[in-house]
Image (tube, rainbow, N blue to C red):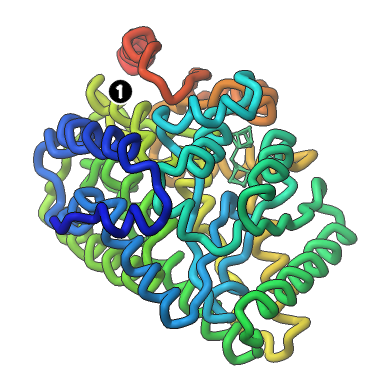
Amino acid sequence: MPDRHEMWKDLGMDLEAHDTLCSVLPQAFGDIYLSQENRPEGMAFWDMVVSDIHGIRPAELMEAQKEGRKVFGTFCLYVPDEIIVAAGGIVTGLCGGSQFWVPAGEEVLPKSMCSLIKASVGARLGRTCPFFRIADMYVGETTCDGKKKAYEILGRDVPMYVMDMPQMKRPQDYVKWAEEINAFKKIVEEFTGNEVTVEKLHEATVLLNNRRKALERVYHARKADPAPISGKDALLMMQIAFFDDPQRCTDMANTLAAELEQRIKDGVGVAAAGTKRIMLAGTPMAIPNWKMHHIVETSGAVVVCEECCTGTRYFEHQVDETPTTASEQIMALAQRYMKNNCACFTPNTGRIDDLLRLCREYKVDGVIDVNLKFCTLYDTESRDVQYALKEAGIPSIHIETDYDDNDAEQLRTRVGAFIEML
Ligand code: BJ8
């Protein structure tokens, strides 16, 4: 692996603190990932990405910047990647998933804020993540209150644009969201110096729909029993999709899916047929948050689906590729993105429908509804989730947790007891 210190220095990173982060990741990845048995060979790609996670892609992004391309950092699935890609920009996900970044976030944010927000702010202000240094512009969105306030803080340190999300799904909200996407398009055009033409937006839409299809193909394979891939590996693929090159992501996911389809034909699985099948639902799991998957899969069950933004919400629903005018294209984007059922919407009954449908499709034995501590949106919605699952006869538990490992043993006991009774 090449020495990246010069590159990180050029990015103005805190090298000493960053070295500490780099020293713990290989051990954690080895314990959690490389210890798994019978992994698909295709996972070698993602293992390689993790082995140089702050090197390979950042170096590519910096090369692209030298050629005049702009990098946009995003925090939410509602920001339409298509617009950025159509303008020749590059999207990189910026949600922090490590406890390492939380203390730097807590220097400027209340402790009673979810770890995802604290880690994201901490990664920027602590100067310990190259992706946060590289992004030329951050794009936020008015989803939860914590994020809105965090964007004000980030906006003092880096160019920041915030999209105003509707909070309901009435006809006028679709119109409003289309207007917001249109306004965003103008900002991106100005920032990149490139016009988003109908042709370019069509190309970007096809590219990103193909990525969705490839990721969905991997998920489709997970419906088989025995499961051909662990939940941990599928999660890693999803987490890296947020910052990888979209075409490479599509190619690698399709290669992996083909291997999984062959495994299904051969009856090969990562756990014996009949192993209890768990769906995780709730708040997103940004890299390297592998905590719940690891606990579940070392407690005798396999995770077969994630109902969250680092799961099905990332790839479900294609953008209509048929529009031939700019305004129709923008409306097609608005319609697709509004199908995402985040708890920031009211009412959000579509999410309950999604959950019940996914339980059927993935033949789920039980649901673990996981909620990052201090996320009041998902916490509040968990009552409806639990009620609907109970009505449908699907066992579930609600878990509130954090990025640190202090509660790991307690969670292991609860999860173990839950799996036992399935
Ligand atoms: S579309 S889930 S990515 S907003 S966990 S920061 S909601 S307090 S991340 Fe999200 Fe977009 Fe919705 Fe998805 Fe706030 Fe909750 Fe923290 Fe969250």
**What residue is at 63 percent from the left and 19 percent from the top?**
112
Which quarter of the picture shows residue 121? Answer: top right
The answer to whether residue 273 is left or right of residue 388 is left
Residue 123, position in %: x, y? 47, 40
Choose between 229 and 51: the one closer to the eye. 51
**What residue is at 51 percent from the left and 60 percent from the top?**
135
Determine whether 43 is above or below 284 in the image: below
Choose between 277 and 252: the one closer to the eye. 252
In the rendered image, which quarter contains the C terminus?
top left
Tell me the kind of residue under disc 1: Ile
In the rendered image, which quarter contains the N terminus?
bottom left
The answer to whether residue 75 is left or right of residue 265 is right
Question: Residue at label 1?
Answer: 295
Residue 131, position in %: x, y? 43, 54
Q: Visible in this render: residue 272?
A: no
Residue 418, position in %: x, y? 38, 14
Q: CB of residue at label 1: within 8 Å of ligand 1?
A: no
Sort mark 1 into few (<14), some (14-19) or many (20+) by Cα contacts within 10 Å.
some
Choose between 194 and 396: the one closer to the eye. 194
Which quarter of the picture shows residue 149? Answer: top right
Residue 62, position in %: x, y? 39, 69
The answer to whether residue 200 is left or right of residue 269 is right
**What residue is at 49 percent from the left and 78 percent from the top?**
69
